Amino acid sequence: QKEVEQNSGPLSVPEGAIASLNCTYSDRGSQSFFWYRQYSGKSPELIMSIYSNGDKEDGRFTAQLNKASQYVSLLIRDSQPSDSATYLCAVDRDDKIIFGKGTRLHILP
Amino acid sequence: KAGVTQTPRYLIKTRGQQVTLSCSPISGHRSVSWYQQTPGQGLQFLFEYFSETQRNKGNFPGRFSGRQFSNSRSEMNVSTLELGDSALYLCASSLDRGEKLFFGSGTQLSVL
């Protein structure tokens, strides 16, 4: 089993709709969870971090964590064309941050 | 506050050569991590340094090495380059391990 799994996409979402990105992880001991956004040709930038079960909201972004199911998700409300990018889920494991391969999100104007 | 600075931005080398990449972390960040990014494998962890000590290492051959200086700046070295080493090498700094990572712009290495 891969340590951090994401659907590679592309995920196509109409402008103004909600984009839902999902991630599962294998290490039950993981305590820190992150979502990064990476535009083509650029380096990853941190969007959200979440450490406890439940939802965490920041503007149009909501991160959801369920440690029992080993599942993390990112919701993007009112999707904009500028949200088109690859979204990377990252999890701490053995004191290092491990990344999924990312989900490509495409917002349709 | 200045971000993470990586140099050079692009490198072209031939097989068998060696290369050194440089990274200056955000001021106050003592942890520096290195990642290799390729289209097929995504972001893969290389190693992490804190206070001049390597604390963690990924699954890469010994040709990949690094070090950290007393001012937290870090270098990564790849010896005997292979075609498969062509990748984007990203440096990230954080306050400590397991914490939020802030990435530099990366070094795009092409091995011919």
Image: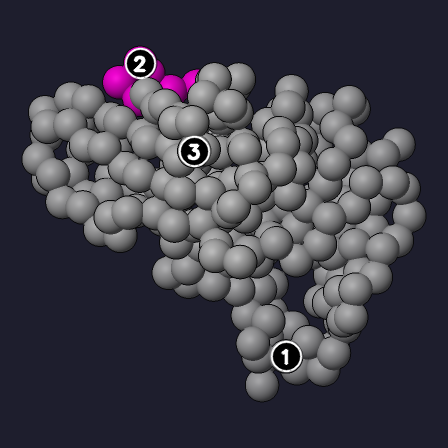
> Which amino acid, by three-letter code, is at mark 1?
Gln
Residue range of the region highlighted in magenta in the rendering: B58-64
Please determine whether, in this image, residue A71 is positioned above or below residue A29: below
Does residue B66 appear left or right of residue B48 in this picture?
Answer: left
SS category of the residue bearing label 3: loop
Real-space Cα distance between discs 3 and 2? 25 Å
Disc 1 and disc 2: Cα gap in Å? 44 Å
In this figure, which residue is indicated by the disc labeled 3?
A: B71
Q: Does the image show residue A14?
A: no
Q: List x then y, in percent, for residue B60.
A: 38, 20
Of the 4 image quadrants, the one containing the C terminus of chain A is bottom right
Give the secondary structure at mark 1: loop
Residue B80 point in image, percent of width and height? 15, 22
Tag nearer the camera, 3 or 2:
3
Q: Image quadrant of residue B37?
A: top left
Residue B41 lies in what quarter of the image? top left
Q: Say how the picture is coloured.
A: one colour
Chain of residue at mark 1? A
The answer to whether marks 1 and 3 sit on the same chain is: no
Q: Is residue A38 visible?
A: yes
Q: Which residue, given by chain and number where applicable, does mark 1 sit on?
A: A80
Q: Which of the two discs, 3 and 2, labels the residue nearer the N terminus?
A: 2
Please tell me which residue is depicted at 26% across the width and 18% down the height of the picture.
B63
